[in-house]
Image: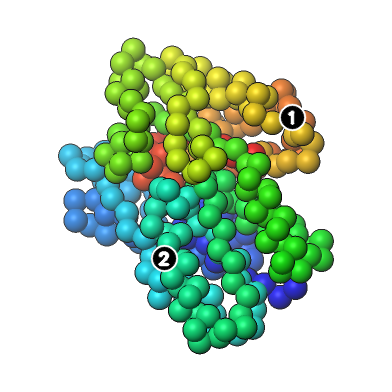
Amino acid sequence: MKYRIVGDSCLDLTEELRNMDNLTIVPLVLQVDGVDYVDDSSFDQKRFLRAVAESAECPKSSCPSPESFKEAYGDDDTAVFGVTLSAELSGSYNSAMIGRQLALEEHPDKKIHIFNSRSASVGQTLIAMKIVECAKAGCDFEETVEKVEAYIDKQQTMFVLENLETLRKNGRLTGVKATLVSVLNIKPVMIATPRGTIDQKSLGRGMKKAVMKMAEEVGGLVKDTEDRVFGIAHCNCYERAITLKKEILKRYHFRDVIIVNTAGVSTMYANDGGVIVAF
């Protein structure tokens, strides 16, 4: 199958994905105090985190235009699989779908499917990896769509952050009390719902205990670990990710455990020291 993967820039890349010729990332734009940061290969995580720390304002993001997605899909006969942020958290999915309609107006026979990840960050990473796995196994377009949608239905995403203020101020924590983070050093373990919204799973006092609590929660969410890849995304805290990986390997029998660094969008929401997992 001749195919192309098109992701928004919340899809945090492994080295293998980064080196793929048939993967295109359409960047979101982040803004801090009126300064734009394009979430592409030029993104400087440390500079961005420093700007956020020094600002009294909440950072914001703007999703790519439909035309940007349309251009990324290409005007050839290559099949396209899009992977975007949860439609409940960003306008990126809707923009990708409008871009699809624009592309199909010009190329009505082109095969394009946009996956609503109902996740973010490393959750999108694992979805892209699943697409590659299906293609390598010889699946055609329709089979790949079916298998990847089934994978998304079973995927779990959790995270622990130093603070939830960016999520709260950008309206991504409807019904969740972000103030707990600053009270008695309580860190909530957050989980993506089946709809792709965010809910609270459990609590831990301090980041270390909260991350270990997140590791404990994995066992109650999935049993068939042998056929799954466990993904960890970290925001400027590689040692914390390594510690979590060791804990996961000690407790469970996942096929593989991968670690990725957060790109721009994931960095904005995870904040310095945040950890996201998907499996």
For the C terminus, the image quarter is: top right
Q: Measured from the top left, where is residue 65 in percent x and y?
A: 37, 69
Return the residue nearer the eye: 219 or 208: 219
Q: Where residue 63 sits in the image (x, y, percent)?
A: 36, 60
Residue located beneath label 2 in the image = 95
Give above or below for 110 relative to 236.
below
Q: Answer with mark 1 or mark 2, whichever residue precedes in sequence.
A: 2
Residue drawn at the location 36% of the way across and 45% of the way down: 268
Residue under the point 82% across and 61% down: 137
What whole-number distance in Å separates the C-alpha atoms at marks 1 and 2?
36 Å
Task: Give me the residue at 64% from left, 78% from top.
Answer: 78
Q: Nearer the viewer, residue 81 or 254?
A: 81
Residue 161, position in %: x, y?
Answer: 42, 31
Query: So how many labels did they put on this image?
Result: 2
| Secondary-structure class at tag 1 | loop
Q: Quadrant of the N terminus?
A: bottom right
The amino acid type found where label 1 is placed reads: Lys
Q: Residue at x 56, y 21 (%)?
A: 212
Identify the residue position indicated by label 1 in the image. Answer: 223
The kind of residue tagged 2 is Ser
x, y percent for residue 53: 26, 38
